[in-house]
Image: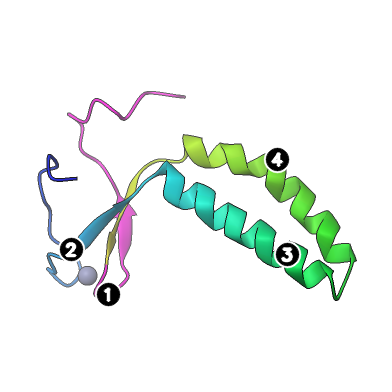
């Protein structure tokens, strides 16, 4: 994190900017699956909704990095061209 050239929020100029990467999306999907399974205890068809999500969860690793402002919740694309980690996947 500390190696990244810091950038302030384009909307509110806040310096409280965090990078949301692949694991962030992956855990969001896992959290949704967990919530659906919990609700499935009350309403069983919800369990079947969680199955396609389970297959979708590896796709989170192909999502681009985004930056999020902690003050205004604004999100924008991580577009640092010199970033070696952004592999051309398409
Ligand atoms: Zn902001």
The residue under label 2 is 9
Q: Which mark is residue 36?
A: 3
Q: Is residue 56 above or below residue 86?
A: below
- Pointer 4 residue: 55
Q: Nearer the viewer, mark 4 or mark 1?
A: 4
* Residue appearing at x 75%, y 55% in the figure: 50
Mark 4 and mark 1 lie on one chain; the one further toward the N terminus is 4
Q: Is mark 2 within 8 Å of ligand 1?
A: yes
**Label 3 C-beta lies within 8 Å of the nearest ligand 1 atom:** no
Which residue matches tag 1?
72
Q: How far, Cα to Cα, is label 2 from label 4?
A: 34 Å
Are dots 2 and 1 in contact, CB under 8 Å?
Answer: yes
| Picture layout, residue 50 above or below residue 45 | above
C-alpha gap between disc 1 and disc 3: 29 Å
Answer whether labels 1 and 3 touch (C-beta < 8 Å): no
Q: Residues within 10 Å of mark 1 (few under 14, many from 20)?
A: some
Q: Secondary structure at mark 1?
A: loop
Q: Quadrant of residue 17?
A: bottom left
Residue range in magenta is: 70-90
Quarter of the figure with residue 10: bottom left
Which of the marked residues, 2 or 4, is nearer the chain's N terminus?
2
> Within 10 angstroms of label 2, few (less than 14), some, or many (20 or more) residues?
many
Ligand 1 lies under 8 Å from the Cβ of mark 1: yes
Q: Residues within 10 Å of mark 4 (few under 14, many from 20)?
A: few
Residue 40 screen position, x and y as percent: 82, 68
Q: Is residue 75 magenta?
A: yes
Q: Tag 3's secondary structure?
A: helix
Could you say where residue 75 lies in the image, as x and y percent from the top left? 33, 60
């Amino acid at each position: 994190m500390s190696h990244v050239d810091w950038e302030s929020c384009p909307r509110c100029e806040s310096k409280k900017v965090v990078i949301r990467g692949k694991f962030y999306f992956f855990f969001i999907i896992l959290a949704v699956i967990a919530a659906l399974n919990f609700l499935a205890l009350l309403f069983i068809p919800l369990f079947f909704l969680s199955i396609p999500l389970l297959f979708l969860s590896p796709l989170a690793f192909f999502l681009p990095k985004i930056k999020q402002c902690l003050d205004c919740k604004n999100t924008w694309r991580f577009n640092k061209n010199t970033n070696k980690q952004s592999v051309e996947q398409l």
